[in-house]
Amino acid sequence: MFVKICGATTAEEVHAVADAGADLLGLWHEVPGGRADLPADRLAELAAAARATGRLEPVLVTFGTDAAALAATAAHAGTGWIQLHGYQRPALVRSLRAELPEGTRIVKVLHVHGDTSPEAGLIRAYERAGTDLFLLDATTADGRLGSTAHTLDDSVAAALADRMERPFLLAGGLRPDNRDRYPATLAHPGFLGIDADSAARGDAGLLDAARTADLVRAWRTP
């Protein structure tokens, strides 16, 4: 099971996440108003720090919609994963795939509110355009995206997964104590791992090794 922790802004957080046993580190760029949004040079610094741990793979997490600019940023930072966290269309995935080096993974977030996802009807189009995997995440009633601490219903997540031919990560308010809420999702053949943010943070709001380790241990233990 992959464990992705999102929203690092300091080298100390990078090392905390690596020490806790996570695999992927989300670094925000072009996330307007995001508390963890990074300029391109800082993104590159933290991506290098992640790779230097020998464990973490940095993931560029973005609301961006300019394929050429995103590919240039990914090349500058040396990130082999790009997560499109927003309502980008399949055409952007297609353009981005054409711009990126072979082997770069494109993750498309599917946003879920209640029991529906506005992108559900585009799953096949995203796959044809070059999406490698999906990430299922919950939105709030007022439309906020990402790091909302809102959870998905297990049956809704599993039903969306049934419509995919690509693997997926599960996000949305995941904590050490709620793994047992997702039996159908965890048993799905496409399930690849989890993505978390809030549950990995300490009292000061920074990513914390102990909190992250608790999360990793709980979700990797049957």
Image (cartoon, rainbow, N blue to C red):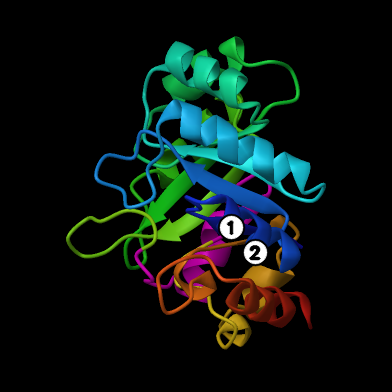
Q: Is any atom of residue 196 visible in this view?
A: yes
- Disc 2 residue crowd, few under 14, some 14–19, many 20+, Cα 10 Å: many
Looking at the image, which is closer to me, 140 or 36?
A: 36
- Secondary structure beneath disc 2? helix
Amino acid type of the residue that numbered disc 2 sits on in the rendered structure: Ala
- Disc 1 residue crowd, few under 14, some 14–19, many 20+, Cα 10 Å: some
Q: Do the residues labelled 1 and 2 touch (CB within 8 Å)?
A: yes
- Residue designated by label 2: 16
Q: Indicate the quadrant where residue 143 lies.
A: bottom left
Q: How many labels does the image show?
A: 2
Residue situated furthest left in the rendering:
142
Horizontal side of 37 relative to 178 (left or right) equals: left
Q: Position of residue 41 (x, y in %)?
A: 48, 27
- Secondary structure beneath disc 1? helix
Report the magenta residues as a range: 148-170
At 59% from the left and 57% from the top, the residue drawn is 12
- Front tag of 1 and 2: 1
At 62% from the left and 54% from the top, the residue drawn is 14
* Depicted 164 relative to depicted 140: above or below: above
Q: Is any atom of residue 3 visible in this view?
A: no
The image quadrant where one finds the N terminus is bottom right
Q: Where is residue 101 in the image (x, y as percent from the top left)?
A: 69, 15
Q: Where is residue 92 in the image (x, y as percent from the top left)?
A: 44, 21
Horizontal side of 57 relative to 31 (left or right) equals: right
